[in-house]
Amino acid sequence: MLELSAKPISHPDCCLSLSTPLVTTLAGYLPEFPDLVLSIGSGSGLLERLLTARHPQLRIQGVEIQDVEGINKHLPEEDVFTVVGSIGSGVTCERASVATAWMFVYPRTPLLVRNYVQRYGGDCVDIIIWLGPKSDWEDFAPAFQSAAFENPQEIMDCGLPAYETMVIVQKKLR
């Protein structure tokens, strides 16, 4: 298992820079078992595996496009779902309808996020975490506009380098 440090470091198996404070901060926002966290675009599954190894009370599953190179090197096979399509096609995974939390890590297109919010945002999901380059957030922010969700909140000092950000979007209280 990868050793983390307090300083964010890039790793070849994850788009996002990884650090101990990041994993701790993420775990503080994610719901515990039996609730489900779905990582949409989980890639190799390294971030998800680090989260569950350090915080075993979390239940995280990943979903990725079937033909993506490097898919699932780190998550148990039963916790990975694939969808057939292309990154720009807007294909979604039905597993999102039963997840209490979603994580988007370096999503490639706002269309993907918008499709999940429109199709499954009224279901079980209470919190969405977006992680990626600060420079991309402006393009993705409109995808989270929904009457069901609060305004997005950027989380400062979360263990990411200055060029990356974590944004939390929570469902409005009913």
Image (cartoon, rainbow, N blue to C red):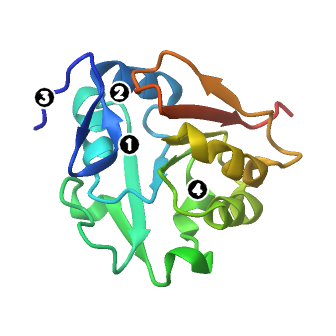
Q: Is residue 12 left or right of residue 91?
A: left
**Picture coordinates of residue 118, whole percent (x, y):** 77, 62
Q: Which mark is residue 98?
A: 4
Instruction: Report helix, strand or loop for mark 1.
Output: loop
Q: Residue at x 35, y 27 (%)?
A: 23
Q: Which residue is mark 1?
A: 59
Q: Which residue is mark 2?
A: 23
Q: Quadrant of residue 123?
A: bottom right
Q: Earlier in the sequence, mark 3 or mark 1?
A: 3
Instruction: Report helix, strand or loop for mark 3.
Output: loop
* Mark 3 Cα-neighbour bin, 10 Å: few <14, some 14–19, many ≥20: few
Q: Residue at x 50, y 81 (%)?
A: 86
Q: 35 or 126, which lies in front?
A: 126
Q: Earlier in the sequence, mark 3 or mark 2?
A: 3
Q: Earlier in the sequence, mark 3 or mark 4?
A: 3
Tag 1 near tag 4, CB within 8 Å: no
3 or 1: mark nearer the eye: 3
Q: Residue at x 69, y 66 (%)?
A: 115
Alpha carbon of mark 2 to alpha carbon of mark 1: how far? Answer: 14 Å
Q: Amino acid at mark 2?
A: Val
Q: Residue at x 10, y 38 (%)?
A: 1
Q: Is residue 120 left or right of residue 172?
A: left
**Picture coordinates of residue 72, whole percent (x, y):** 25, 62
Q: Is residue 26 left or right of residue 21?
A: right
Q: Earlier in the sequence, mark 2 or mark 1?
A: 2
Q: Amino acid at mark 3?
A: Glu
Q: Which residue is mark 3?
A: 3
